[in-house]
Image: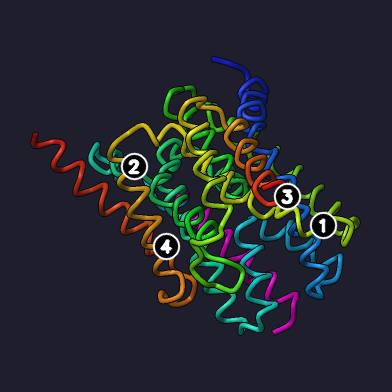
Amino acid sequence: MSNWALIIYCGLITYLTRFSMIALIKKEMFNDRIRKILSFVPSAIFPAIIFPAIFINDKGLFEIDNNPKILAAIIAMVIGIFSRSIIATIFSGLASYWFLIFVV
Amino acid sequence: MKSNFKVFLKGIIDVSPLMIPVVPFGLIFGVLAIDIGFTPIQTIAMSLIIFGGASQIVLLQLFSGGASSLVIISSVGAVNSRHLLYGAVVSEHLSDLKLTWKIIISYFLIDQAFATSNEYLKKNKDNNRYFHLLGGGATCWVIWQSTTFLGIILGAAIPEKLGLSFAVPLTFLALLVNDFRKFINVIVILVSGLVATFGYNYIPFKAYVIVAAVAGLFAAMILTTKDKKA
């Protein structure tokens, strides 16, 4: 498959995942129970991106020793819980990561 | 009711803090794509056609690892499966719209716009509230296209040592700051995160994202049922 075909297919599948539910679902299909469950969607999905990005290295291996990302992420999380600020969370995480890899 | 433009503007303002980490993400994507052997035009086309950071990074990772097209496309689909859930959540607010609007809005249904607009849509019931989602999506679009372009130009000038890819999990972490305070959410976060981490190498087709999300939602289902009885 050419690079172009690959890009177009990937674009198509990305778009369809976004469009399908918006196009198909009607308001009446939601009761309070489903609504309640769906409110947990961010909590159920984002960690699936966060955790592997922190604990799994470039080679696809689980890495817990000598991994500055773990401490940096914990600092970011604590700052996030207390400040409730998105920017503070991200910057404290990046700053502590750089501190750990360049200074310590 | 606020004017369409004001709601659109509110969407831009609300999503702005989330755009800061998109900048390094877009740069990294541009740099990596060229490095792997895509032409500048193909790299720009990826950001225009796919318009999804996680999808595009997964595409590059698997492509450089020599994965087959079928594996790459299904992995991108698996990474994108979260959009099915986003769509299901926002569709409730968009169900009265014309198909043309649904087609346009779908293109802009990305992580950052979803996260900020979902809060807005829950609180506001005006008929034009979907302009908030458009504002957030359009902002991210501009940032994503321009940083992809910059990444292509800057190329090797950005030191890999900076570890800017770490901005990706931090962005998603920042989106959850309010959920860390709620007990059920914390359990859901842990279930999803642990399933994704330990399933990373064992769940085929990089489907760990959807498997972890389903496990997390299942935990939420069990915990909220108990909650109701108590």
Q: Which of disc 2 and disc 1 is earlier in sequence?
A: 1
Q: Nearer the viewer, residue B229 or A51?
A: A51
Chain to which mark 1 belongs: B
Amino acid type, callout 3: Phe
What span is in magenta?
A: A1-22
Numbered disc 4: secondary structure: helix
- Closest to the camera, between mark 3 and mark 2, is 3
Q: Residue at x 34, y 42 (%)?
A: B186
* Callout in the foreground (1, 4): 1
Closer to us: B212 or A100: A100
Q: Are marks 4 and 2 on the same chain?
A: yes
State the separation of the CA atoms marked 4 and 2: 15 Å
Residue placed furthest toward the front: A104
Looking at numbered disc 2 in the image, what kind of residue is underneath it? Val
- The answer to which of A94 and B103 lies nearer the viewer is A94
Q: Which mark is residue B186?
A: 2
Render colour scheme = rainbow
- Marks 1 and 3 belong to one chain: no
Q: Quadrant of the N terminus of chain B?
A: top right
Question: Could you classify mark 2 by the number of other residues whose Cα lies within 10 Å: few (under 14), some (14-19), or many (20 or more)?
Answer: some
Q: Mark 1: give few (<14), some (14-19) or many (20+) Cα within 10 Å.
A: few
Pointer 1 residue: B159
| 1 vs 3, front mark | 3
Can I make out residue B26 in this image? yes
Residue B131 shows in this picture = no
Q: Which mark is residue A102?
A: 3
Which subunit holds the residue at mark 3? Answer: A
Say what amino acid the circle numbered 4 marks. Ala
